[in-house]
Image (tube, helix red, strand yellow):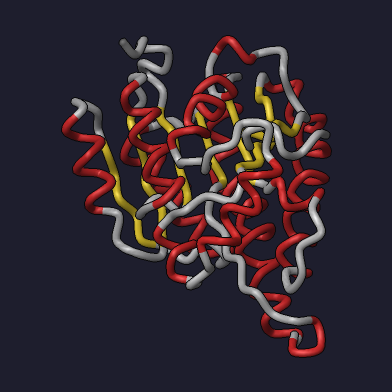
Amino acid sequence: MTFQTHHGRVAVVTGAAGGFGRAFCVGLAERGADIVAVDIRDSTETIEAVEKLGRRGLSVTANITDPEATAQLGEQIRSTFGRCDILVNNAGTYPNRAFDELDFDLWRSVLSLNLDSQFLMTKAVVGLMKENSWGRIINLTSNSIVLAVAGVTPYLSSKMGIIGFTRGLSTDLAPFGITVNAVGPTFTQTEGMNSKGLPPAALDAVVQKQAIKRPGTTDDVVGTIAFLSSDDAAFITGQTIMADGGLARM
């Protein structure tokens, strides 16, 4: 049985067309939240899953690295729902490239989507949260920041930056009843991860380093997102929680 801990809340989730984003949308809808699913891809299937649960849903196709697009998105949320209570900054990219083959354009594209978009999305909706003196912002980082992983320097830089962004923002927004936390999943098989063609041995190597020795799933992180976006987490802010089967120890 899933309790309606989020009844009356409106949650905005980026990267919502599949993978973690879709799981977060469905998990929050199961708990009573209405959902704004944001992605550069079409999120119709995600919204269909939300509406089957009896919740309102809005699919928005947008480039969340564009300041003008995110500002317009904020206005669309205001006109459709009149509020925003929860923001899950989930969208991200993780190209694998040796440093000698890395150029500035790729560096900037990773930082732009993984880190800049979290700043822009927060700017787009934080005013709505302040109006109700209540908000929950959850930024997706990664447990890979404590691992020795080759070929992902821009990715690790962005994911460490997210932790700094989370800590600074949590102090700035605390007077307005808004908490800000980060969550780091483990290496998880999603559509995006599978598209990279990574060998099964790479996943197994991660699993063997975890305390819980099975592959992580998108649903494994939903509970952490649901808790941090609930009233129960009102006194938790500026924290990074690794929902990764006990691999990373912060």
Note whether 27 is above or below 121 in the view shown: above
**Coordinates of residue 177 in the picture (x, y in percent):** 66, 19
Q: Residue at 33% of width from left, 34% of height from top?
A: 26
Note whether 54 is above or below 41 in the view shown: above
| Residue nearer the viewer, 105 or 151 | 151
Please state if 36 lies on the left or on the right of 51 as rendered.
Answer: right
**Coordinates of residue 24 in the picture (x, y in percent):** 43, 37
Q: Residue at 49% of width from left, 62% of height from top?
A: 193
**Coordinates of residue 188 in the picture (x, y in percent):** 52, 50
| Residue nearer the viewer, 216 or 106 | 216
Q: Residue at 72% of width from left, 38% of height from top?
A: 247
Question: Which quadrant of the rendered structure holds the N terminus?
Answer: top left
Q: Quadrant of residue 218?
A: top left
Note whether 199 is above or below 159 in the view shown: below
What is the total number of numbered labels drawn onto the structure image? Answer: 0
| Residue nearer the viewer, 167 or 135 | 167
**Coordinates of residue 27 in the picture (x, y in percent):** 38, 29
Please state if 77 lies on the left or on the right of 134 as rendered.
Answer: left
Please state if 117 lies on the left or on the right of 240 as rendered.
Answer: left
| Residue nearer the viewer, 116 or 153 | 153
Q: Quadrant of residue 50?
A: top left
Question: Which quadrant of the rendered structure holds the C terminus?
Answer: top right
Q: Residue at 50% of width from left, 25% of height from top?
A: 223
